[in-house]
Amino acid sequence: MSFHPDMQIATLSEITPDIHGRISKRTAQLTDVDVTEVTFHAGAKWSEDLREYAGTELCELPHVALVTAGTLGVKMRDGSYVEFSAGDAMLLPPGHDAWAVGDVDCTFVEFSRGTEYYGS
């Protein structure tokens, strides 16, 4: 296989997951973008599995992602609610809680610009 010098490849399934309770993440770091596969296993909820780790009441990170399996329920700080299912592209602003809907895992792949995107 021959690559252009600026092409990059990463295989998410080969990356050791970062696990927080019932939520697992695999992140590939490419030059200008991070690609993260996030799985909310059945019963997972951000406020139960990641709140303590994040140190915030709600998730304060923005997300741009494509849901690849299952359904993710999202409730915003203002009480608005939406469900994103397999095949849906989503943009979530900061200030939300999220969980796997039903008894199946929800997986999505998100794209970010590393620390610039997350403001770290």
Image: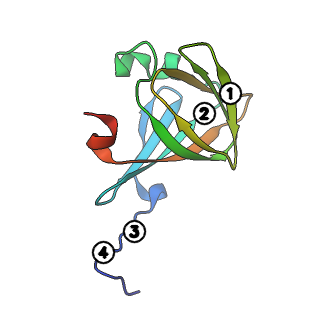
Report the residue marked by disc 4.
Answer: 6
Instruction: Pick whichever of labels 3 and 2 is earlier in the sequence.
Output: 3
Q: Which residue is mark 3?
A: 9
Q: Residues within 10 Å of mark 1 (few under 14, many from 20)?
A: few
| Crowdedness near tag 2: few (<14), some (14–19) or many (≥20) residues, C-alpha within 10 Å | many
Residue at mark 4 to residue at mark 2: CA–CA distance: 35 Å
Indicate whether 39 appears above or below 109: above
Q: Foreground residue, 116 or 35?
A: 116
> CB atoms at circles 1 and 4 under 8 Å apart?
no
Q: Is residue 119 left or right of residue 52?
A: left
Say few, some or many: other residues with alpha carbon within 10 Å of mark 3 (under 14 / 14 to 19 / 20 or more).
few
- Indicate the position of residue 100 as horizontal and vertical percent values: 65, 29
Q: CA distance from mark 3 to mark 4?
A: 10 Å
Using the image, tell me which numbered label, if any, was put on residue 82.
1
Q: Residue furthest bottom?
A: 2
Q: Secondary structure at mark 1?
A: strand
